[in-house]
Amino acid sequence: MSEFDTNLITFRLDELEKKLVVNFKEMYNKIDAVLKNQTDNQIQLALEMQRRERLERDVVALESQVCKNTEAVTAVRISLAEKVGYGLLGGVGGGTVAGIIQLLSWFMAG
């Protein structure tokens, strides 16, 4: 083999090595981007799960409060009905209490 052939082979190998280095760098950059994206997605998913759990707890608390409020309104309605029934308020007062009960029923339905 002549010196020219040796230099040509060396040149071609050097060029091939450069191309491989560039291609590997591009591949590593792409892999890094994919890993970063995956990590970001996992973090976002964890945050969304925390938000969902907090919202579920809030819904349970609100439902409990609605039950308590419904019980309180029912107790008031029963108390007013008992007073009307026993004639403690009688006449105009009974009509007023009936109107209040009607109004409370309307608020509970709305």
Image: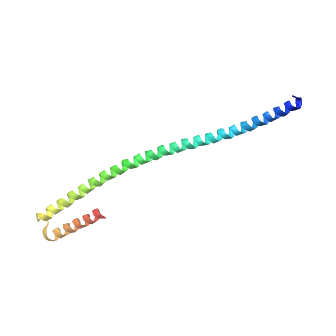
The residue at 19%/67% (across/down) is 98
Q: Position of residue 56 (x, y in %)?
A: 38, 49
Q: Position of residue 70 (x, y in %)?
A: 26, 56
Q: Nearer the viewer, residue 15 or 29?
A: 15
The residue at 84%/34% (across/down) is 8
Name the residue at the left extreme. 86
Rendered view: 84 above or below 33? below
Name the residue at the front extreme. 1
Q: Position of residue 12 (x, y in %)?
A: 80, 35
Rendered view: 26 above or below 100? above
Rendered view: 87 above or below 15? below
Q: Is residue 64 left or right of residue 10?
A: left
Residue 88 visible within the image: no
Rendered view: 49 above or below 18? below
The quadrant of the image that shows the N terminus is top right
Q: Is residue 38 left or right of residue 107?
A: right
Residue 76 visible within the image: yes
Q: Is residue 12 left or right of residue 90?
A: right
Question: Colour scheme in the image?
Answer: rainbow
Q: Position of residue 75 (x, y in %)?
A: 20, 57
The residue at 40%/47% (across/down) is 54
Q: How many marks?
A: 0
Q: Is residue 103 left or right of residue 52?
A: left
User: Quadrant of residue 31 in the image?
Assistant: top right
The quadrant of the image that shows the C terminus is bottom left
User: Quadrant of residue 32 in the image?
Assistant: top right
